[in-house]
Image: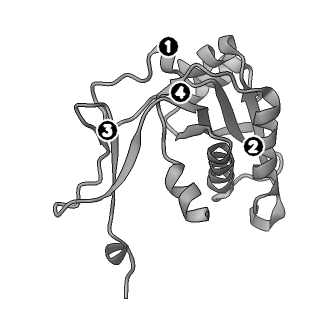
Amino acid sequence: MLRELITKSRSYRRFQQAAIEHQTLRELVELARLSPSAANLQPLKYILSCDPQKNDLIFTHLAWAGYLKDWPGPEPAQRPSAYIIILGDTRISQSFGCDHGIAAQSILLGATEKGLGGCIIGSIQRQALRKTLSIPPHYEILLVLALGKPAETVTIETAGPTGDIKYFRDTESIHHVPKRPLDEIIIG
């Protein structure tokens, strides 16, 4: 069951036009809240958006799919229905270790369980987003999670003999994600 959930939890970048309720975002952040935190400091805070106008503002400060050089991101009809911005509260800690990665994974697994998909975005115009959303300076912008009902097929495959791990889309717009073989990543 967990393996299936992890396998289904891919980086989706194109979505159907299906609203996500604010309560659903709260439920996803509750999963992050319950997740492990280094020294149990719990320094993460979250901005939730399921408002189309606010979503448009957030979208303009994100970069999408670096390996797909000729693709600027989803067209308006395929953009995310919601975002969760993960912040680090520097009043609690100056370092966030891997807390935001754990939180992001918990949120995306929860989203997958609800029939949603998402993408963890680290390529963010942070200062511009801070200004646009009036985010106070004591919050470090760590990640943005784009969420929605997936409108694309993403498949996992084993990386070929060249070891190329760059994801790509084929002529039918299926998104392929090469993964290194298990025996290659286990040492000794």
Q: Which mark is residue 28?
A: 2
Q: Residue furthest top?
A: 53
| First-in-chain label (2 vs 1) | 2
Q: Secondary structure at mark 2?
A: helix
In this figure, which residue is indicated by the disc labeled 3?
67
Per the image, label 1 sits on a secondary structure element best described as helix
Of the two numbered discs 4 and 1 on the same chain, state the one appearing first in sequence. 1
Query: Can you give x and y, in whole percent of width and height, for residue 43 in the image?
Result: 79, 50
User: Which one is nearer the viewer's eye here, 114 or 179?
Assistant: 114
Q: Position of residue 51 (x, y in %)?
A: 72, 17
Q: CA distance from mark 4 to mark 2?
A: 24 Å
The quadrant of the image that shows the N terminus is bottom right
Q: CA distance from mark 3 to mark 1?
A: 21 Å
Give above or below for 35 relative to 154.
below
The three-letter code of the residue at mark 4 reads: Gln
49 sits to left or right of 2: right
Residue 127 seen from this side: yes
**Do the residues bearing badges 3 and 1 touch, measured as CB atoms within 8 Å?**
no
Q: Earlier in the sequence, mark 2 or mark 3?
A: 2
For disc 4, the marked residue is 125
Circle 3 SS class: loop
**Res. 137 in view:** no
- Do labels 2 and 1 touch, CB within 8 Å? no
